[in-house]
């Protein structure tokens, strides 16, 4: 068990007319090796929740235990927690500041006290992980790169800290479809190769369905669904009630089944759907 | 922490003060500031206090809000008090080491501190009761006679509107970048002054870059909608002086005229 959250609540502007409960009694457990998709509307509390996990926001009440450390303990080392829990913000390219890509990615590990060879190794390996060529890009200014590349530099900057839990807050926002697919692909590789536990915050059911093995749905500061990905999309009506859809392909397969065709209804990707329909057609042919 | 800054904030309302013509309000505050510097004894302060009190009452402003606006200036007020107490010559009351406290010093210190407090609360009354747009409209109109000598009144007002508009945006952005860098282990809170200044680089560089980017985008968006400065530009809500605007203006001119005259009586 990597993270355990108990009765976490956060209230914006307490005791004023603008008071707003952003997190309402959250209980959650994240295990090592999880790939969690966190979905919900704007203002549902997703970003607030993930910013609590590395101690950047402090809750109104409740506790968070990360890797055995209670982060609200007086002598908890916040830097250590921020190393364990890497957080990539929305539009992370807006935080780039160094003269070269190398220096920018090295900022995090340097703050952890790493030097020389180890530092270089970290920068190099994290650049490779996000698909940036070390030799050609390390001395370039991050500001002259393309949007997708900038974002990768920013993500590499967090990966270079070797977190146990990597949180990505809408990593694909504002990217074109191919840029989006590339980033998602790299996140998947990261998960498979490095075995990092990942939380992916997103609006997009499609993205989350493709990657995660567990889904959390947030609505008005509460976690209303916490289940395995396939199970979650069976609750289509519940999701639609709060204005979230299920992936188009899942929706299609459910509709297809409801017309009396014998297919699985927990399909998540187009690829899976293809297999299932082919199987179905073959069965029918034989019959 | 950054959310506490209330300077220039607008407190929406629907009172006579809120509806008063911004030009009238600006002139009154100008008079207010001028009279504060003419006052040379404690008694006129009572009138000033009365003025502030009445405006707060009519405009239904929460006192807490006004006091919060003073908070960032506690330090300056304290320094003023301190310097005046110890640096004014006169009848010695007592001495602490090399410092002497005089009767005149204490009275001067209180006098100056009050002047500062009144100055801040008075001017914040203007921004609290006038929306930024009304404020810049008022400034533009007041400056427009100077167009003859080449003063770009509209452009100045537009610059002010934009600057005011972006204060909350920039604060929000600072907050966000700060968090992002803290997530990468940056430390903004400890170390000596030199180190702290150095640690601000990861915050300031992105902030400036984003501000320039925003400015660029805004300029493009304005040009795309054919903005080309103040010439021949008309507005939706023309400012018009009503009778009560004039009545209030005249009464306030008389009021502050009296306060200023107390110096010479």
Image: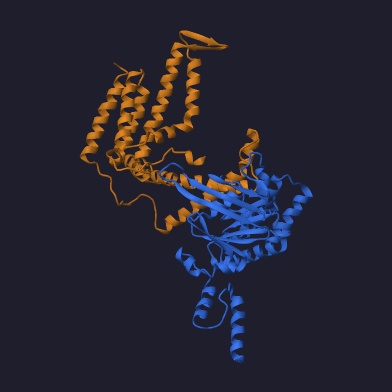
Chain colours: A blue, B orange
Check the image and report above or below for B235 versus B127.
below
Q: For residue A178, which quarter of the picture?
A: bottom right
**Nearest the camera: B141 or A251?**
A251
Horizontal side of B200 relative to B15 (left or right) equals right
Residue A36 location in percent, x, y? 61, 61
For residue A126, say whether it is visible. Answer: yes
Quadrant containing the C terminus of chain B is top left
User: How many numbered markers are drawn?
Assistant: 0
**Nearest the camera: A30 or B63?**
A30
Instruction: Kindly identify the residue that appears in the image at 51 percent across and 9 percent down.
Output: B94
**Nearest the camera: A19 or A127?**
A19
Horizontal side of B116 relative to A182 (left or right) equals left
Instruction: Kindly identify the residue that appears in the image at 61 percent across and 87 percent down.
Output: A283
Q: Residue furthest right?
A: A117
Check the image and report above or below for A62 versus A286.
above
Residue A244 location in percent, x, y? 48, 65
Residue A41 location in percent, x, y? 49, 59
Residue A247 location in percent, x, y? 53, 70
For residue A59, say whether it is visible. Answer: no
Check the image and report above or below for B69 versus A158.
above
**Nearest the camera: B92 or A71?**
A71
Q: For residue B17, which quarter of the picture?
A: top left
Instruction: Kindly identify the residue that appears in the image at 33 percent across and 36 percent down.
Output: B26
């Amino acid at each position: 068990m990597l993270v355990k959250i108990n009765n976490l609540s956060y209230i914006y502007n307490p005791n004023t007319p603008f008071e707003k409960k952003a997190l309402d009694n959250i209980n959650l457990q994240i295990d090592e090796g999880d790939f969690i998709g966190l979905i919900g509307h704007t203002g549902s509390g997703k970003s607030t929740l993930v910013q609590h996990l590395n101690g950047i926001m402090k809750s109104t009440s409740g506790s968070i235990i990360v890797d055995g450390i209670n982060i609200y303990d007086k002598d908890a080392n916040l830097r250590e927690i921020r190393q364990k829990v890497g957080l990539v913000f929305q539009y992370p390219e807006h935080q780039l500041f160094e003269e070269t890509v190398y220096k920018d990615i090295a900022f995090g590990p340097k703050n952890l006290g790493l030097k020389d060879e180890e530092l270089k190794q970290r920068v190099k390996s994290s650049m490779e992980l996000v698909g940036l060529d070390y030799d050609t890009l390390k001395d370039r200014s991050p500001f002259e790169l393309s949007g997708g590349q900038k974002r990768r530099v920013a993500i590499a900057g967090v990966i270079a800290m070797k977190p146990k839990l990597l949180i990505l807050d809408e990593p694909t926002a504002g990217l074109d479809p191919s840029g989006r697919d590339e980033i998602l692909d790299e996140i998947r590789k990261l998960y498979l190769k490095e075995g990092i536990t990942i939380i992916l915050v997103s609006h997009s059911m499609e993205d989350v369905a493709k990657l995660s093995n567990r889904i959390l749905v947030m609505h008005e500061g509460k976690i209303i669904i916490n289940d395995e990905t396939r199970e979650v999309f069976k609750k289509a009506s519940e999701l639609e009630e709060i204005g979230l859809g299920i992936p188009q392909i899942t929706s299609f397969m459910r509709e297809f089944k409801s017309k009396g065709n014998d297919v699985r209804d927990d399909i998540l990707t187009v690829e899976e759907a293809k297999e299932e329909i082919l199987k179905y057609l073959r069965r029918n042919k034989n019959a | 922490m950054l959310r506490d800054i209330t300077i220039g904030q607008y407190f929406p309302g629907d009172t006579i003060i809120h509806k008063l013509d911004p030009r009238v309000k600006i002139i009154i505050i100008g008079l207010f500031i001028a009279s504060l510097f003419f006052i040379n004894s404690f008694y006129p302060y009572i009138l000033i206090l009365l003025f502030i009190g009445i405006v707060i009452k009519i405009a239904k402003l929460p006192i807490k809000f006004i006091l919060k606006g003073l908070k960032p200036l506690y330090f300056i007020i304290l320094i003023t008090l301190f310097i005046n107490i110890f640096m004014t010559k006169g009848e010695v009351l007592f001495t602490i080491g090399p410092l002497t406290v005089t009767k005149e010093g204490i009275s001067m210190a209180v006098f100056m501190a009050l002047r500062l407090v009144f100055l801040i609360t008075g001017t914040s009354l203007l921004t609290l009761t006038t929306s930024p747009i009304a404020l810049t409209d008022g400034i533009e109109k007041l400056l427009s006679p100077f167009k003859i000598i080449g003063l770009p009144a509209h452009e100045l007002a537009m610059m002010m509107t934009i600057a005011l508009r972006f204060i909350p945006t920039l604060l929000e952005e600072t907050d966000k970048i700060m968090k992002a860098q803290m997530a990468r282990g940056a430390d903004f809170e400890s170390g000596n002054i030199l180190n702290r200044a150095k640690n601000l680089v990861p915050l300031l560089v992105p902030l400036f870059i984003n501000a320039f980017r925003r400015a660029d985008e805004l300029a493009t968006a304005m040009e795309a909608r054919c903005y080309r400065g103040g010439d021949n530009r008309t507005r939706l809500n023309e400012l018009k002086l009503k009778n009560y605007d004039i009545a209030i203006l005249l009464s306030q001119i008389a009021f502050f005229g009296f306060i200023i005259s107390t110096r010479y009586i």
